[in-house]
Image: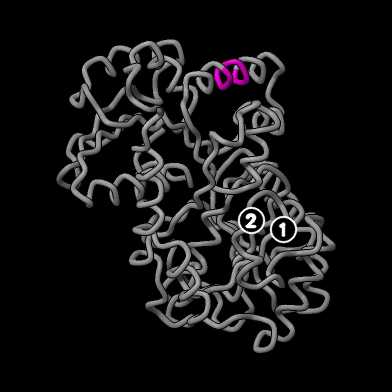
Amino acid sequence: MGWSPTSPGGLNRYLHELTAQIAAGQDWVEFCGTDLPTCSPQPHLILTTLTSEKVALPQRLWQAHQQFKQRQMVAPNAINLHFALYGLPLLNQLPQQVPVTFTFHGPWAIESQHEGASPWSVGFKRWVEQRVYRRCDRFIVLSQAFGIILHETYRVPWEHIHVIPGGVNTQRFQPNLTRQMARQTLGWPTDRLILFSPRRLVHRVGLEELLKAIVLVKQQIPDVWLAIAGKGPQRETLDRQVQEWGLQDHVRLVGYLADDQLPLAYQAADLTVVPSQSLEGFGLILLESLACGTPPVCTPIGGMPEVIAPFNPNLVTATAEAGGIADRLIELLQRPTVTLPDRTACREYACHQFDWQKIATQVRTVLLKSSH
């Protein structure tokens, strides 16, 4: 759907890092997507723009169909689809003898339904997903939780599903500043307990519940301060709630953070908070925070406990509601030296379990596996 970091988002970052790793291993990779740069950033990587997000949907699909015909790598060893919408216009051009793997990042139709899309829109997206999935030989999911959704909702047999977690760029996300230096660079308070939540501002990510939790937390910890980074349709609602709930001195919506500022923000925080309410398949935020040395706290939703519980189960809240989030934040912040893992432990866990070089090797093995 775009090129990271120009187009932000976890899916785009995942694809950018995965592609870079596989191409660095001397395999030639052709990356087909929307609005890609004109020049490739590394050898062995070909960038092919199929269409632009700026044009109407019918034109986008037609352009993708036409441009895919002109791709340079006409006889690939493997094909990896990541978004059903742009897979649809390519289906009749995929070579029959080449294995097709779909990386399932989430149930597109169900996510739209949760955000209030019309029944027609939800039905169309479900049809697109089912049509594309029928053509695929195997699937990669980032968590067992999303494997269950893929199996139960879309009837994909378990033997066709491979669980491989996401990865993190441990060179880009690393603890290279003190907490105070990171705060000063960002212009954030240097004398407060800081929580950080980078999220797209939509319903399912749980920011309203997090604001309710801060109302409770500040009663016990008056100097708590939350920075929410991101943009999305919930911005005005969240701004209004900050005012109505008297959180002006405790919450700041900082908007979209530039790519070079994100590692700074993780390092500036005492805790990263991921308060998702539904359909959180993995949570790359968790890995980025850990790699920067900052413990992340998450709700018990989707694949997030699979990432965090093996490291420290106390970093998973008891419930996804505001009360459960608040209770765990208070417990952790009141006795941080007792309850929180230190920078070194966070960093070592991220590097050992989720370094991209290790993850990309697993993905490559699945992509190139024979279908027979």
Magenta-drawn stretch, dominant element (helix, strand or loop): helix
Q: Is the C-beta separation of discs 1 and 2 under 8 Å? A: yes
Above or below residue 97? Residue 299 is below
Q: Mark 2 = which residue?
A: 304
Above or below residue 63? Residue 321 is below
- Residue located 31% across and 44% down the image: 19
Disc assigned to residue 299: 1
Q: Nearer the viewer, mark 1 or mark 2?
A: 2
137 vs 128, nearest the viewer:
137
- The amino acid pointed to by label 2 is Met
Crowd band around label 2 with a 10 angstrom C-alpha radius: few (<14), some (14–19), many (20+): many
- The amino acid pointed to by label 1 is Thr
Q: Is residue 357 magenta?
A: no
Q: The N terminus appears in which quarter of the rendering?
A: top left
Rendered location of residue 296, percent (x, y): 60, 67
- Residue located 42% across and 47% down the image: 14
Toward the left, the furthest residue is: 43
Q: Secondary structure at mark 2?
A: helix
Q: Which residues are magenta?
A: 125-130
Rendered location of residue 12, percent (x, y): 42, 42
Spatial CA span between label 1 and label 2 = 8 Å
Rendered location of residue 259, percent (x, y): 38, 56
Image-based side of 179 in relation to 301, left or right: left
